[in-house]
Every structure is written in structure tokens, then in C-alpha cells.
Amino acid sequence: MKRTFLLCIGAVAITVAATGCTPKKFANCTDVHKTYAGGIARPGYHQVGMVTKYVPHVDLALYNANSSMDRDHDGVACEA
């Protein structure tokens, strides 16, 4: 299904097509780290006391698709 939206910014109108993309499901954490070095986090994850080498990418749909790789259930899948 293809949807078209019209976005008006001042006197400029931009047409944006939404294709209904589904988030990518990665096979394992090694594949995640090739794209997102810090892993994938859900919005509002708790960073208190979290020490990571890289900052995780925050995206709810992407996190939900790969949440099985969040072994410690802290809201970040494949944290580095």
C-alpha cells in the first residue's frame, strides 16, 4: 500500500510517499554492530550506570523487531 502526504512549509509544498516499510530484523548482534555500533535502544531506555563504548541508535520499531537480542532486558539490544 502506498500513501502520499503533502507537507507544506511556508510557501513550499513537498510531496512525501510513505511505503509502509518494516524494520530490519538482524540475524545476530554481529550484524547489528555492522550498522549500529552501539546497538539498538527503545525510546526511554535507562542509561543510569550503563557504561558502553558507543551510543545506541534509538528506534522503537527497530528495537521491537530485534528485542530478542536484548538479553539483559535493559531496553538496548546488542549494546557494545
Image (cartoon, rainbow, N blue to C red):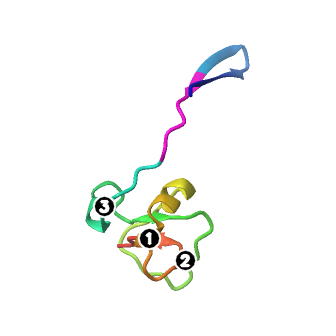
Mark 3: secondary structure: loop
Image location (x, y in percent) of residue 41: 50, 65
Q: Which amino acid does label 1 sit on?
A: Ser
The N terminus sits in image quarter: top right
**Residue 48's quadrant in the figure?**
bottom right
Name the N-terminal-most of marks 3 and 2: 3
Residue at 55% in and 77% down: 47
Which range of residues does the magenta coloring cover?
16-22
- Left or right: 64 with respect to 31? right
Mark 2: secondary structure: loop
Residue at 73% in and 19% down: 10
Residues at marks 3 and 2, CA–CA distance in whole angstroms: 25 Å
Residue at 61% in and 18% down: 15
Residues at marks 2 and 1, CA–CA distance in whole angstroms: 19 Å
Q: Nearer the viewer, residue 8 or 32?
A: 32
Image location (x, y in percent) of residue 9: 70, 22
Labelled disc at residue 68: 1
Q: What residue type is labelled 3?
A: Ala
Q: Mark 2 points at which residue?
A: 47
